[in-house]
Amino acid sequence: MALGLAVMAAGAAPLARLGAVPTTDDPRYHTMSETYRHVADEQLICGAQMHVDVSDRDSAVRALCVINPGLPPLSALSASSPYWLGADTGHASRRSMIWPRRPTCGPRSTN
């Protein structure tokens, strides 16, 4: 806790119901809901984001070499229930199947 960090549970609601989900009252979220429509309605997941800024590509490669071995455990910790709308999806994590449906999600470079 010296750095102000804590563990947080996140994932998807295994007993979610489809339908109108209130959008956070923020223009950004209203735009996302309007842009993605059905994808946004089925999202019903939560999670955490991590943004890392590095000064150059060489530093980025060095940082990724250090971080890379920890990615599988981090991915496992961010997984969620295999259930969706009360049924077993056959996937280890429903969240990992929903999240990539958004075209703006996933690792990418801003350079």
Image (cartoon, rainbow, N blue to C red):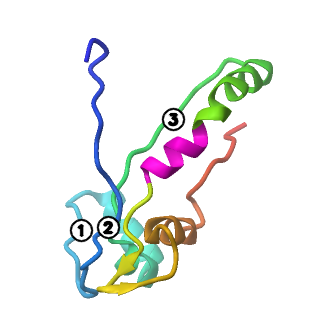
Type of amino acid under label 2: His
Type of amino acid under label 1: Thr
Q: Which of marks 1 and 2 is in front?
A: 1
Q: What element carries label 3?
A: loop
- Residue numbers of the magenta segment: 71-78
Q: Is residue 92 above or below residue 26?
A: below
Q: Nearer the viewer, residue 71 or 108?
A: 71
At label 1, counting other C-alpha atoms closer than 10 Å, the crowd grade (few under 14, some 14-19, many 20 or more) is some
Q: Is the magenta stretch mostly helix, strand or loop?
A: helix
- What is the x, y in percent for residue 11? 35, 60
Residue 108 is a magenta residue:
no
The answer to whether mark 1 and mark 2 are in CB contact below 8 A is yes
Tell me how far mark 1 sits from mark 3, CA to CA. Answer: 24 Å
Specify the farthest residue to the top: 2
Tell me how far mark 1 sits from mark 2, CA to CA. Answer: 7 Å
Residue picked out by circle 2: 30
Q: What element carries label 2?
A: helix
- Residue at x 22% of width, y 77% of height: 21
| The N terminus sits in image quarter | top left
Tell me how far mark 3 sits from mark 2, CA to CA. Answer: 23 Å
| The C terminus sits in image quarter | top right
Residue picked out by circle 3: 51
Residue 12 placement, left or right of 109: left
Q: Is mark 1 on a helix, strand or loop?
A: loop
Residue 74 is a magenta residue:
yes
Q: In which quarter of the image is residue 17?
A: bottom left
Q: Which of marks 3 and 2 is in front?
A: 3
Circle number at residue 23: 1
Of callouts 1 and 2, the N-terminal one: 1
- Residue at x 20% of width, y 60% of height: 25
- What is the x, y in percent for residue 46? 33, 58
